[in-house]
Image: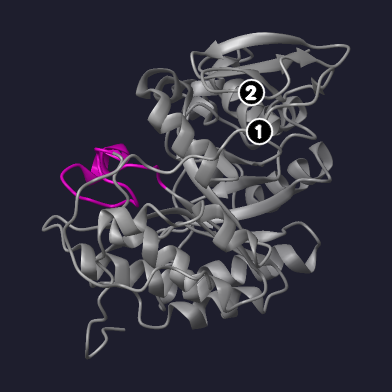
Amino acid sequence: MRFATLFAVTIPIAVIAQLQPLKSYLNASGRYLGAFTNQARQNSAGATYNNLLRTNFDSVTESNACKWESLQPSRGNFNWGACDFTSNYITGLNGKFRGHTLVWHSQLASWVNSITGSANVDAVMKAHIQAVMGRYKGKTYAWDVLNEAIDDSGNMRNSVFMTQIGSSYVEKAFQYARAADPAAKLYYNDYNIEFQGKKQDAAVKLVSGLKAKGLIDGVGLQGHFTVGQMPANLAATVKRFAALGVDVAFTEVDIGTKSQDFTGQARDYTTLVKACVGEARCVGITVGGIRDNESSAWRVGEYCLLWDEQYRPKPAATAVATAAGGAAPVPTSTGGTPTTPPTTTPTTAPTGATSPAYGQCGGTGWTGPKACASGSTCQVVNEWYSQCLP
C-alpha cells in the first residue's frame, strides 16, 4: 500500500549510528534478525564486516554452501567445509542457524537430474536429507526442506523429483526430514507467495496438507521486493499462513531500488517489519546480506540492504528498528558525516574462564575467554574470529 504522505526516515548518519544493535529491537519481542553470509565473505571482508555481523544479527543463513550442488556435487561425495564454517560460527555465538536448502530444482547437482525411476530418485533424495540433517543435527534451528516447488501459475514445478516420483515427493521429503532431526523446524520456502493469487493459494494448500499430517512447522516468505511494489495486503498474507497453525518467517529479504530511493525503501522495510511483528507466529526476519554489494547476482545494480558499501547504515536500518518497536532517534534531516558503524564493547572475562565448544576464543578485539572447555581446542578461523572446536 502506498501512503498518501511519505514520512521522513532519512536521518543523519551520526544519529543512525546511535541505534542499538538491530537484532535487539526484534529480540525484544522474541524474534530474531538474520542475514545471509558465507565463509569467503567473512574471511575477506575485514573487521568492520565481521563486527557488524556479530553485533546486529543473531541468525545466519549460508548463501550457497549448504545447497545440493555445493554439498554433494557427485554421488556420495560431500564437501562439508564451508557449510560447517557457517554453522559453527553462529552456534558459537548461541545464535540460530537456518539450513538452506534440502530439496530444490535449482542449484541441484547435475548427476541427480540424470537419475530415472521413482524408487531411485526417492532413495537419492532420502539419503541426501539424512546425511545433511544428520551432520547438523542439534545445531540447526530450521531447515528449508522444500524450496520453490510451486511455479508462478500455481502448479507444481517441473523437476526431477516431480517427474520421477510425482507430487508425493513433497510429503516424502518432509517425512525424511522429520525423522532425521525431530527437533529442527521444517519449512516450505518460496518467492512471490506474499502476493495474493494462484501461487499463494497453492502454497496454502500445500502447507495445509503437510500440517494436517504433522510434517511442517513453518512457511518462509522470501521477501524479494522492489521499492514501491510491496504487496498491499502483506500483513494479511502473514496472518493467512499463520492461521494454518505454522510459524512464518521472512527468509531472504531484499528490497531493491536502482534509483537509490532510500526514503521509499525505508517505507517498504517498515511495511515488512510491521507485518511480521503484528503476527505472533511471525518468528523472525532474515535479510539477504549486510551491504548493498552483497545482494544476489540477479539484483546487480540495485541497492537492496540495510548498509551501503561503505558500511554506513541506511534509512532502512532505522526503519527496521522503529517498526520493530524500538525507540529510534526522531528523524530530522539528511546528510551528515559518516561514522564508524557501532560495535559492542567487549568485557574482560573473569580469570580462569573458558569458552564452551563452538564458543569464541580469540580474534582481533576479543577480550573474552581464550581457553576452551575440555574436549575442544581454540582454532583460528580468521583474523577476527577464533573458535573452540572439538
Q: Is residue 293 magenta?
A: yes
Residue 381 circle label: none
Outermost residue toward the left in this view: 259
Give the image location of residue 4, x and y in percent. Answer: 22, 91
Residue 367 circle label: 2
Q: Is residue 388 magenta?
A: no
Q: Nearer the viewer, residue 252 or 116?
A: 252
Give the amino acid type for the residue marked by disc 1 in the picture: Thr
Q: Which residues are magenta?
A: 288-310
Q: Residue at x 18, y 64 (%)?
A: 334
Q: Are marks 1 and 2 in contact (CB under 8 Å)?
A: yes
**How far apart are labels 1 and 2 at the CA level?**
6 Å
Q: Quadrant of the C terminus?
A: top right
Q: Earlier in the sequence, mark 1 or mark 2?
A: 1
Q: Residue at x 28, y 52 (%)?
A: 304
Residue 347 circle label: 1
Q: Nearer the viewer, residue 100 or 68?
A: 100
Image-based side of 230 in relation to 343, left or right? left
Image-based side of 190 in relation to 335, left or right? right
Give the amino acid type for the residue marked by disc 2 in the picture: Thr
Q: Quadrant of residue 358?
A: top right
Mark 2 is surrounded, within 10 Å at the Cα level, by few (under 14), some (14 to 19) or many (20 or more) other residues, namely some
Give the image location of residue 295, x and y in percent. Answer: 31, 42
